[in-house]
Each structure stands twice: as structure tokens, then as C-alpha cells.
Image: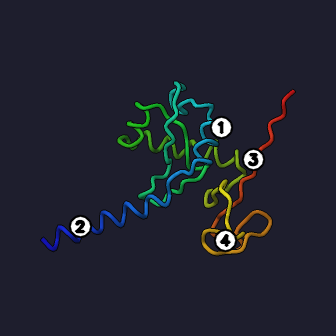
Amino acid sequence: MDDRSAKRRQREELQAASKRNDFSAIVRKHVRERDQERCVLCGKPGREVHHIISRSQGGLGTADNGICLDASCHHLAHRSKRVASRLIEYRKRVLLPLYGLKSEQYIWLDALTDGRCRCGGEIIDGECAAGCGLKIGMEREEKNG
């Protein structure tokens, strides 16, 4: 019985930790608008926001780590290493340049409550001075012509 309760406790702790890396409503909205509610793999309508780097592997709920997928591609993304590799390449080739990021950086769209990074570092010129990789995202203004 002790072994079961320890495993259950470990599973619950992992679930709680992974919830911290969920996409916020702001990030979900941004990703859906950016991807025009289209699956980045097949082009069909898709509103499911997927973590490119999974939460269990330390992936954050940030815009550079989120993409829109339709239901069938989302299913494949969780079960096919080939599809997962394609998505990581998409992040490197498309999303990082879009946000002007290096591979170790991430974009943060949500407001920071006290002007400090999630790691506790000071924010200077839109980046974390502690070097954790945070870059503050600014909403791009769309020009209507």
C-alpha cells in the first residue's frame, strides 16, 4: 500500500507542476490568431493549441512553444516521434525567427505582476537580466490599409 500511495503522490505532484506550464487565455488567443486557426501540419481548420516541447520535458505555455493543430494531427503529435520532430523543426525554422528568439529564449505575453521575471531576475530592456531566456513579447500592431 505504501508503494501505491507514493506513486499516487508523485503523479499528483507531476500533474500540479505541469499545470503551471499551461497556456494562458492570452497565449491561446495569440496562437490561434497567429496560426489563423489552421493546423500547421495539414492546413485544415484547427483550434487545439499544442505544446511543441511537452510540459513533461519542461516546455512552457509560451507563444513560441504553441501551435494550432486539428484533432487528428494533435493525436498524432502525441504518438508519433516523426511528427514531434517535425514540430520542433517548425519551431526552429518559423516561430523563433518570427519572435526574434534564439533557441534558449522564450517569449512571454502575459503581464508580469511586479516587473520581475518568473525566475526572479530583473527585467531590463525587455529581457531577463538573470539570463534565463525570457523575452517580453509586445503585441504587433496590425496596419489596416
The quarter in which the C terminus is drawn is top right
Q: Which residue is farthest right?
A: 145
- Residue at (58, 31) in percent of width and height: 37
**Which residue corresponds to mark 1?**
34
Residue 87 horizontal side relative to residue 6, left or right:
right
Whole-number angstrom distance, CA of label 3 to CA of label 4: 23 Å
- Residue at (47, 31) in percent of width and height: 70
Whole-number angstrom distance, CA of label 4 to CA of label 1: 27 Å
Q: Is residue 68 above or below residue 14?
A: above
Whole-number angstrom distance, CA of label 4 to CA of label 2: 35 Å
Q: Are marks 4 and 2 in contact (CB under 8 Å)?
A: no
Mark drawn on residue 131: 4
**Which residue corresponds to mark 3?**
139
Mark drawn on residue 53: none
Helix or strand or loop: what does disc 4 sit on?
Answer: loop
* Label 1 crowd bin: few (<14), some (14–19), many (20+), radius 10 Å: few
Q: Earlier in the sequence, mark 4 or mark 2?
A: 2
Helix or strand or loop: what does disc 3 sit on?
Answer: loop
Q: Which amino acid, mark 3?
A: Glu
Task: From the image, state whether disc 4 or disc 2 is nearer to you.
Answer: 2
Task: From the image, state whether disc 3 or disc 4 is nearer to you.
Answer: 3
Q: Which residue is farthest top?
A: 44
**Which residue corresponds to mark 2?**
7
Whole-number angstrom distance, CA of label 2 to CA of label 3: 43 Å
> Of 118 and 40, which appears nearest the observer?
118
Helix or strand or loop: what does disc 1 sit on?
Answer: helix
The quarter in which the N terminus is drawn is bottom left
Task: From the image, state whether disc 4 or disc 1 is nearer to you.
Answer: 1
Q: Position of residue 62 (x, y in %)?
A: 59, 53
